[in-house]
Image (cartoon, rainbow, N blue to C red):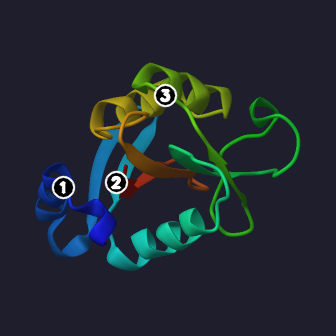
Amino acid sequence: MDRLKDPRIQSLMTRAGSSGELCMPLDEGQFRIDLKPDNIELWQDTLDRQESPCTLLLACERSDGPLHDTSLTWVVGSAIRAVEVIGQANVEHLLQQLKVPQALAAAAREHCFGLGDGVIWAFYLERHGWLTASPVACQ
């Protein structure tokens, strides 16, 4: 958690309270920020294994081929892909390419500060269509 000393993350953790989650219902599902220490630690361990710089960790259906040929999926059994995308608009566009509904991708852009610019975020799409994000590290 030392990699997340940004005061904005501390503010999110305070807002989440003991549940460790912030949930934002939308017409097309729900956007959730997962701030549970154990889950963040797992994402940080994954980040430590990456050989090249990245701004996003994505739980995808496939680890091979072009990124736009796969889709975001559930974490268990997924292929974690580390990618570098600069700028919130570009991240939103990428999430939509990965079959995330537009409203959920827009929610990520709105609620994930530093997205594509200073904060590494991890994303997965739950089985029931909820988009979940976790901050992993501040660059």
Nearest the viewer among 73 and 30 is 73
Task: Write the residue at 32% across / 43% down.
Answer: 25
Task: Write the residue at 21% across / 61% down.
Answer: 5
Q: Amino acid at mark 2?
A: Ile
Nearest the viewer among 88 and 106 is 88
Q: Nearer the viewer, mark 1 or mark 3?
A: 3
In which image quadrant can residue 136 be found?
bottom left
Q: Position of residue 75 (x, y in %)?
A: 63, 63
Total count of labels: 3
Are circles 1 and 2 on residues that touch, CB within 8 Å?
Answer: yes
> What residue is disc 1 on?
12
Q: Position of residue 132 (x, y in %)?
A: 45, 52
Distance CA(mark 1)–CA(mark 3): 23 Å
Circle 3 sits in a helix, a strand or a loop, which is it? loop
Residue occupying the far bottom of the picture: 38
In which image quadrant can residue 96 be found?
top right
Which tag, 1 or 3, sits closer to the chain's start? 1
Q: Nearer the viewer, mark 3 or mark 2?
A: 3
How many neighbours does mark 1 have within 10 angstroms: few (below 14), some (14-19), or many (20 or more)? some
> What residue is disc 3 on?
86
> What residue is disc 2 on?
33
Which tag, 1 or 2, sits closer to the chain's start? 1
In which image quadrant can residue 134 be found?
bottom left
